[in-house]
Image (cartoon, helix red, strand yellow):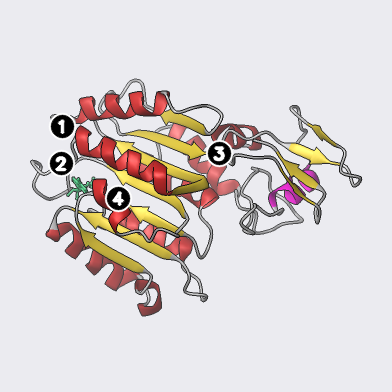
Amino acid sequence: MNLYSYSSLLGRRIVKCEPNLKYYISPSLKTNTRNIAVFASSSEPNGTSISVSGAHSPICPDFPISGCMEQVMVEYLFGRKKATEVAHYVWKQVVQKGDAVVDATCGNGYDTLALLKLVADKTQRGRVYGMDVQNSALESTSSLLDQFASPDEKELVELFIMSHSQMEDIVPNDMAVRLVAFNLGYLPGGDKKIITKSETTLLALEAAKRILAPGGLISIVTYVGHPGGREEFEKIEDFASILPVESWNCCKLQTLNRPLAPMLMFLFKKWDRIFVLPKHNLVSCF
Ligand SMILES: C[S@@+](CC[C@H](N)C(=O)[O-])C[C@H]1O[C@@H](n2cnc3c(N)ncnc32)[C@H](O)[C@@H]1O
């Protein structure tokens, strides 16, 4: 994914600022790696790193969007990457070490583990709140974490047997949540009759909207191949389509000629103000 498509996904425009704080908006920003690297390494209002760009920068080797993101998108276009893999790469652009995130449908725990790896670091500040209505799902998640997460990492995860529509009950009030991930449908290898339902999914999306910090993302993988799946997908689409464009950027990725292929939706909650970062002489404008 290049700079333009990524900043479009997050509803961002690239702004370059002169040292005297006069700034100009640069809609046709050339792929000048230095500008992009400086922009990308500037800070968001919460003091964490911004995640914008698709350039391979010699200046900033740990560039948040590496060639991998671009490669994943291209491979998705050519049918070689799954929707869930694309979702994980998009999360990587938004989630920072130490963040709080929610896995609204733990299932077998692959998403929980991926989220944990994004937030965990030695500060032990990160949190993953995971939930599922099935005990067997939480057991699978726990066992996956036992295999692939360190004891310190596992301490950052809290698992709850509950519906995601109640997520506000378990996320502390003062916690700024960076990402809420939904991977809907039924538990692979489990009881196909226990599935997410459009009514509770919509309640959960409303809750996710309320707890999400500005600059955060609601990520949804939906499936239309099972009973109720298409209705759920359409309801989510309706929900996302009317979110105000001033504060949300909502996108969908869909494989047109595989009508039952999983669909991806990203609802990005924009920053709600213009801010100036004197240190880097940069302005971010959303
Ligand atoms: C496709 S699976 C999730 C896959 C999982 N994220 C992973 O990485 O393996 C969907 C899960 O949603 C769960 N589920 C269904 N209704 C739910 C609800 N109301 N709240 C939370 N989880 C729910 C199911 O039990 C199932 O385990």
Disc 4 versus disc 3: distance between alpha carbons? 21 Å
Q: Earlier in the sequence, mark 2 or mark 4?
A: 4
Residue at point 8%, 41% (across, down)? 193
Give the left or right position of residue 173, taking residue 228 as reference.
right
Q: Secondary structure at mark 1?
A: loop
From the top left corner, tell me how far across and down residue 250 is, in percent: 46, 31
* Residue type, numbered disc 1: His
Residue with the mark numbered 2: 195
Q: Which residues are magenta?
A: 32-40
Residue that appears at 64% across and 44% down: 52
Q: Is residue 103 something that shows in the picture?
A: yes
Q: Nearer the viewer, mark 1 or mark 2?
A: 2
Image depth: mark 1 or mark 4 in front: 4
As drawn, is 119 to the left or to the right of 139?
A: right
Near mark 3 (Cα within 10 A), the count class, few <14, some 14-19 or many ≥20, is many
Q: Indicate if the residue with disc 2 has its beta carbon within 8 Å of ligand 1.
A: yes
Which of 110/183 is in front? 183
CA gap between label 2 and label 4 equals 13 Å
* 39 inside magenta stretch: yes
Q: Which residue is mark 3?
A: 270
- Give the overall secondary structure of the magenta segment: helix
Q: Amino acid at mark 3?
A: Lys
The image quarter containing residue 226 is: top left
What residue is shown with label 1? 226
Residue at (34%, 69%) from the top-left corner? 148
Q: Is residue 130 above or below residue 34?
A: below
For marks 1 and 2, give the CA distance.
Answer: 9 Å
Q: Is residue 204 above or below residue 151?
A: above
In space, the residues marked 3 and 1 are separated at their CA atoms by: 33 Å
Label 4 residue near ligand 1, CB within 8 Å: yes
